[in-house]
Image (spheres, rainbow, N blue to C red):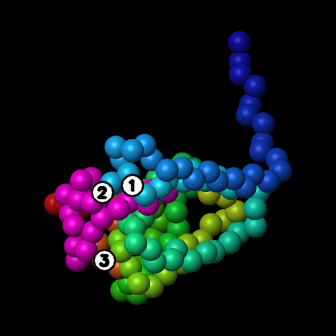
Amino acid sequence: MTEAPEAPVTGVVNEHHRYRPGEPLRRYVAWYTGYRQRGVPPARHRGLPSPYLTLIFTMDDPLDVAAHPDPRQRPGSYDALLGGLHLTPALITHPGRQSGVQVALRPLGCRALFGLPAVATRLADSFHPADNDLAA
């Protein structure tokens, strides 16, 4: 038996759900959000400074960072990234679709996951592919 081709997605999908982690993880993670947008106009938004590091895992298209908080860092596309603590916003763009999971990682969570303090020079004001070995 042959499978029918997947039907094209029609209509607009614009959803997100934010959750607080279970008690054992709360010292490491403030919250996490699943998001999905499809069929929306292309857009850009500012990734604002916060007291958390931003850990993002994309599901479909990479995350496009048009401008990093550190202007010396070139724009890039990331399947997964860790955004360090920063004082200026990042500029994020998408072509009308995006999906993934964003984790608000507490500084203690950064040390637990990556073996680095949140204020490590390599993390401050910058984004890094999360698949890199940041502790190296």
Kindly report the distance in space between the C-alpha atoms of the residues bearing marks 1 and 3: 18 Å
Q: Which residue is mark 2?
A: 109
Instruction: Quote the CA–CA distance across marks 2 and 1.
Output: 6 Å
What residue is disc 3 on?
Answer: 124
Compare marks 2 and 1 and give the one earlier in the sequence: 1
Q: Magenta residues?
A: 99-121
Residue 68 on image: x %, y % = 44, 79
At label 1, the amino acid type is Val
List x then y, in percent, for residue 122. Answer: 25, 73
Residue 83: tell me if it is visible.
no
Q: Amino acid at mark 2?
A: Gly
Label 1: state its secondary structure. strand
Which of the two discs, 1 and 3, labels the residue nearer the N terminus? 1
Circle 3 crowding by C-alpha within 10 Å: few under 14, some 14–19, many from 20 = some
Mark 3 or mark 2, earlier in chain? 2
Q: Nearer the viewer, mark 1 or mark 3?
A: 1
The residue that disc 1 covers is 29
The residue that appears at 35% across and 62% down in the rendered structure is 106
